[in-house]
Amino acid sequence: MNDELNSLMDEAIEIIKNSNNIYMASHVDPDGDNIGSLLSMKLSLKKIGKNVNIIKVDNIPGDFKFLPSVDSITDQPFDKNVDLFIALDSGDMERLGVAKDFALCANNIINIDHHKTNTKFGNINIIDSKVSSTGELVYLLLKRMKIDIDEDIATCIYTAISSDTGSFMYDSTSSKTHLIAAELLNTGMNMNKVVVNLYQSRSLEKTKLFIAALNKLEFFQEGKIGIVSITQEMLKKSNAKMEDSEGIVSFLRDTEGVEVAVIMKEIKEDEIKVSMRSKEYADVSKICLLFNGGGHKRAAGCTIYDSLERSKSMILNEIYKSIEEK
């Protein structure tokens, strides 16, 4: 960890020490890194006597309902007496959804993230795109605060890191990431519980949606590009939710010969959420940035406000260019 990051963490620690009413929020379409980071921070701050509230911005995916203190993420009314707002894994203010108002009325904002596209909207911005996950940054901050990381906190951080590294497979995973994972396991946390809930508990509805998606699978550029669409009609037929499409794009990427995998999710008419993954050389974050999205070199996303077919055509054109540049 470099000197600048250490200095920012020390400033953040001072602000935390001098704040009592601390607010955080699940971001729009929360993922494991966001939720695991939130809960580990909440459990840690409670240990030092802070009043901590977590605002639920969007529904929490069922995969993460096993996490300690997950029920504390709530959409109940909160007053806006906010000493400090801590944003986790949120690239910009809009990612905070309805919680943006709480951030704006806070005395201070600490922004902790690992996305290189982060807009640095906090008073303190602890941003490092070289780490695997926001969970990894949270771990480093808690260690610097000398917080005792118990089994519950370790479970939350491990979930954050594991889910955002594709179970330690993405190239953002470093030797330091593995050392942190080892430290978390040394607390006595139940790794198998995390593995079963994240990777081995696919519902029947999710399985049906998975099968329906594979039946719509298309390949382009001699199999280098794989693309699949999830429509509202498919959700209805499978009795599934859009969150059940999680994992399909990674499965598609893992197909031999595929460099770029894309899933197009029809949120509603003319609103298409795009998730992209790449394997070796394509930088999908650059493609998503063209559509006001972002993310990482190997995993990124964006939202296109157009029809499904036109959105697919626009995305494919940009992927073609990216692959041709290779």
Image (spheres, helix red, strand yellow):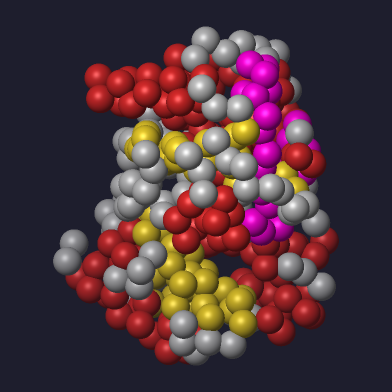
Residue 18: percent from left, percent from top: 51, 22
Q: Is residue 95 magenta?
A: no
Q: Quadrant of residue 155?
A: top right
Q: Is residue 110 left or right of residue 209?
A: left
Q: Is residue 98 visible?
A: yes
Q: Which residues are magenta?
A: 45-68
Indicate yes or no whether the magenta region holds residue 50. Answer: yes
Placement of the N terminus among the 4 image quadrants: top left
Residue appearing at x 32%, y 20% in the figure:
6
Height in image: 263 above or below 64? below
Q: Relative to 35, is 105 on the left or the right?
A: left
* Residue placed furthest toward the front: 81
Total number of numbered discs in the rendering: 0
> What is the x, y in percent for residue 52?
66, 33
Residue at the extreme left: 325
**Residue 196 appears in the picture as rendered:** no
- Side of 88 where 70 appears, left or right: right
**Residue at (38% x, 28% y) in the render:** 174
For this rendering, which residue is in front, 248 or 152? 152
Question: Horizontal and vertical percent for residue 325?
Answer: 17, 66
- Relative to 258, does residue 12 appear above or below in the rendering? above
| 29 or 299: nearer the viewer | 29
Quadrant housing the C terminus:
bottom left
At a point 57% along the width and 13% down the height, the residue shown is: 147
Residue at position x 28%, y 62% in the image:
286
Q: Is residue 219 above or below residue 134?
A: below
